[in-house]
Amino acid sequence: MQLTQSHIDYWQKNLRLTAILLAIWFVVTYVMAWFAIPLAEIKIFGWPLSFYMAAQGLRVVYVAIIGYYALAMRKNDLEHGVHEGEED
Amino acid sequence: MATSQKSFTQQLKKYYTFYTGGFVVFVTLLAIAEQMGMSNKWIGYCFLVFTILLYAGIGIMSRTVEVAEYYVAGRRVPAFFNGMATGADWMSAASFIGMAGTLYFSGFQGLSFIMGWTGGYVLVALLLAPYLRKFGQFTIPDFLGARYGGNIVRSFGVMAAILCSFTYVVAQIYGVGIITSRFTGLEFGIGVFVGLAGILVCSFLGGMRAVTWTQVAQYIILIVAYMIPVVWLSVKHTGVPIPQAVYGKVLERLTEREKELTADPKEQEVRQIFASRAKAADDKLKGLPASYQTEKDVLAKKVEDLRTAAAPKAELDAAEAALKKYPASADEAKEQWTKDKASATGRTAPPRPHATPYPGKDEAARDTARLNFIGVVFCMMFGTAALPHILMRYYTTPSVQEARVSVFWSLFFIFLLYFTAPALAVLAKFDVYTLVIGKSFAELPRWVNAWQSVDASLLSIVDINKDGIVQLAEMVIGGDIIVLATPEIAGLPYVISGLVAAGGLAAALSTADGLLLTIANALSHDLYYKMINPNASPTMRITVAKSLLLVVAIIAAYVTSLKPGNILFLVGAAFSMAASAFFPALVMGIFWKRASKWGAIIGIIAGLGVCLYYMVHTYPTFISWFGTTPIKKWFGLEPISAGMFGVPVGIVTIWIVSLLTPAPEKEVQELVDHVRYPSLAGDIDTRGT
């Protein structure tokens, strides 16, 4: 089992994608929580923004992050020829 | 194989569509029966018996004696269905019944739990699920054992898995006991036994395979049961059947109402009465031990006076009862008065603003509230990404890509409930604040009286200031009532209450199944097969696995029947412990080839050690159990969030110790490459058999 340059690129790409998505995850979760008091001044449809994000909005962001990762990694698998065979 | 997997998925879809249809028909028939005069008790029994028989049926159909079927459902559970099963596995009695209640009481602060319990799946998806699936064995200790080589790490994995899962499973069986006893009138002990039977019929014959297919069935019941009453309540208050989209307006009105209640003179009067009661109790406490006798004399004298004055019988009886209830000794009096003081003090505060983040009297209090909010979010997230019974589910998908997609579906199905719980809390609170508070005692809604007579700890309203009007400060309400009574608050027939109970039961049973299997598998696979008897035949392994499952279940039920207190804290603690023990070793094992055996061993000890040390020295119950000396809370962080110290300590320890010890061998490095790529030419095969 010898890793080729393509394999190494694949892993680098995966690491980059993971890092970017985790950065988004960190900002919407922890930075939002840190600034929850000033963010509560902003109102959307009756909800204070920080309440809305914590109660509803973040759920959507999380689902979107995971969905995007699954799609992007399928593409990455195919591009670098490390996708699984049909029978496995 | 590809076509057979496709037709298998098709077949599953057909089965579960039929099943859902059948369930709807069943509920409709019961609704008709209720209109024709079927009693509430029988409706409760029907739901209990029907659903447990249903799970038993699925369990029997999925029975198996094959090792891979028993441990990982044959690795052919499609992403969509694994998502549903994970959803049911994940959402426990606490999520289903307790979550909305927590949000009702703590408002914004309570949202930390749902943030953590959903955001943790991002970590599962990005850092763990696909790699564990590629590794493809049976348990989490399996991975630790293979990656770090040797039985030491594996046995730590086994111990930590049992420690986290056992506290959690006790809470589930407890939930089953509560639900069955409330809705059928059976005793708690019998309720626990019925629950145990319900759990075993799902898992005993078919292991993971049976648990998976019953969990899918249980998810469908629990989500339907949760949604119906909330939608109805939303129509009642907003006219729109999509509560998640419109409760913002209700939240605005609720905030207005909170301001009214804070300023209301009658409310202030009642809060004042509680303040003086708290002070009276405090004075009595300070006067101990002398006050014990003087107080007793006062009561005795009152009885004498009433008797000589030939007072009305009711008044005399009340005075006599008060004397009879008087504590038997100064120590008991101290205990009683401390309780009185605490409960009265708790009722002197104005309502907590629901939508405001980190309410507090000054900057420091707000900062502590914020830190604890973030602490809970952190620990619930990293705990989610480390609890073995959840991670194990991603071994069951047919491929790495399916595992990635499966995390998406998992969170989607969990999302449906967690998206709704905050709406339910606001709607129910608004209902109580406007339709109960401020009304006269004579015109209370029917559900209030019904629930008051069921259980005073769930709901009790006493006219403290004798004005005939209900003040908020006069009401004591238990968290569980929010979900359990929603059908009645919304004005729905009893059959929906039965449905909610069935949903709660499904939530508790499905989680308990997953946890019991995790514990029994850690013992039968990791301890027995991998460490004690590697030559055991497949038949022998399955027999051992099933026997252990039975033993663990009985021990868990026995512990539950002792009613250990503070179950909710223990569940939270399990997340912190799992995060501290597993997360650093698992993730660094995948992303850092240099992570070494001793790094992992010392890292697990250090992380879990710091976490346990902090809990044992800051949590009052543990302090009295273990006789430890209390320490000052670090940065004011609550003991439930001890993982906030444990996880970083674990990561740093693994890092430092790994660099000080030799790099892992070539085989281990190859294993890491193996799990990183879904498919490699000339790949090694690590699948468990």
Image (tube, helix red, strand yellow):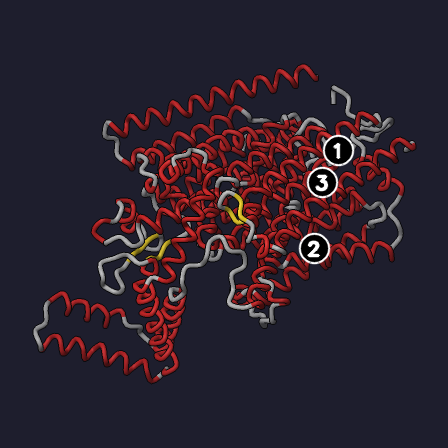
Q: Between B621 and B283, which is closer to the camera in this rendering?
A: B283
On the image, the x and y values in percent for residue B502 come to 41, 36
Give the residue type at disc 3: Leu
Q: Quadrant of residue B209?
A: top right
In which chain is the residue bearing label 2? B
Give the residue type at disc 1: Lys
Q: Which residue is mark 2?
A: B647
Label 2 Cα neighbours within 10 Å, binned few <14 / some 14-19 / many ≥20: many
Q: CA distance from mark 3 to mark 2?
A: 16 Å
Q: Which residue is mark 1?
A: B134
On the image, the x and y values in percent for residue B464 come to 27, 64
Question: Mark 1 or mark 2: which comes first in sequence?
Answer: 1
Image-based side of B576 in relation to B401, left or right: left
Q: CA distance from mark 1 to mark 2?
A: 25 Å
Q: Between B21 and B362, which is closer to the camera in this rendering?
A: B362
- Label 3 sits on a secondary structure element that is helix
Q: Which residue is mark 3?
A: B128
Q: In the displayed image of the protein, which residue is found farthest to the left? A: B310
On the image, the x and y values in percent for residue B262 come to 38, 61
Dot label at residue B311? none
Q: CA distance from mark 1 to mark 3?
A: 10 Å
Q: Quadrant of residue B242?
A: top left
Q: Which of the two marks, 1 or 3, is nearer to us in this view?
A: 3
